[in-house]
Image (tube, rainbow, N blue to C red):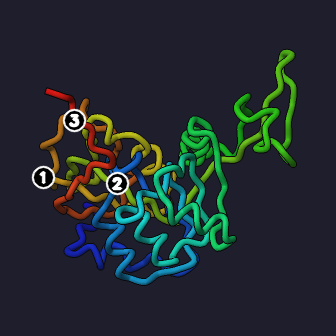
Amino acid sequence: MKTIYSSFEQAVKEIKDGSTIMVGGFGLVGIPENLILALVDSKVKHLTVISNNCGVDDWGLGLLLKNKQIDKMVGSYVGENKEFERQVLSGELEVELTPQGTLAERIRAGGAGIPAFYTPAGVGTPIAENGEVRNFDGKDYLLQTGLRADFSLVRAVKGDRQGNLVYNKTARNFNPMMAAAGKVTIAEVEELVETGELFADEIHTPGIYVQGLIEGEQEKRIERLTLAQA
């Protein structure tokens, strides 16, 4: 049986100043929003955050950014956050930008115990500056290291008491690979079910990767609402 937390405050209490955390989601889809809010309230600081992007100004990881709780961001896309831009240009925030596919593979590699790999993405660009480039079969490849985190915060539509998780459609995004790459993985689930209620074939993340779960209701904000004309 995994730890079932009774509050989001309790779920994040072991995350201390200076921790490295992975946070699932793509834009605002599939983010563990209540765990993020609990981190905001905890006032933990000097975080290194690994996530595809940093939320928006008033929601998701953007709230941690606004509170100056993040020292370094490792991500792929930062275009929706004005505060992110301001902190980068002012030198308040350290940023490591990585091509999106490379970021996903670095996280997957970390979870699989692979310390590094070569990829053609980024060769001949500023990303390759001071990096190791090798030639294989006449093509240059850039060495990239795997990523691990002290804590991974993920979001699933369902989870059982053994930690098995199911994600909903595109909300799966970075969550499964991050669940495997955290030393401690905490899952925010929309519905907590009893062991045996999930069909084996529908499980996306096996419980071996998950240390704790908490059930909660999400707002599921829409990042950019687009309506079709009648």
Side of 138 where 218 appears, left or right: left
Q: Work out whether 33 lies above or below 63.
A: above
Residue 88 image label: none
Q: Could you tell me how far apart the alpha carbons at marks 3 and 1 are, in whole angstroms?
A: 39 Å
- Displayed quadrant of residue 11: bottom left
Q: Give the structural element (helix, strand or loop) at label 1.
A: loop
| Front of the two marks 1 and 2 | 2
User: Pointer 3: what residue?
Assistant: 227
- Displayed quadrant of residue 161: bottom left
Amino acid type at mark 2: Ile
| Front of the two marks 3 and 1 | 3
Q: Residue at x 61, y 44 (%)?
A: 106
Labels 1 and 2: the sequence-earlier one? 2
Side of 112 where 160 appears, left or right: left
| Front of the two marks 3 and 2 | 3
Residue 31 image label: 2
Q: Residue at x 64, y 73 (%)?
A: 92
Residue positioned most to the bottom? 43
Q: Give the structural element (helix, strand or loop) at label 3.
A: loop
Instruction: Please provide percent x and percent y for residue 101.
Output: 57, 35
Q: Residues within 10 Å of mark 1 (few under 14, many from 20)?
A: few
User: Pointer 1: what residue?
Assistant: 194
Instruction: Please provide percent x and percent y for residue 26.
Output: 41, 46
Q: Residue at x 18, y 35 (%)?
A: 199
Amino acid type at mark 1: Glu
Q: Residues within 10 Å of mark 2 (few under 14, many from 20)?
A: many
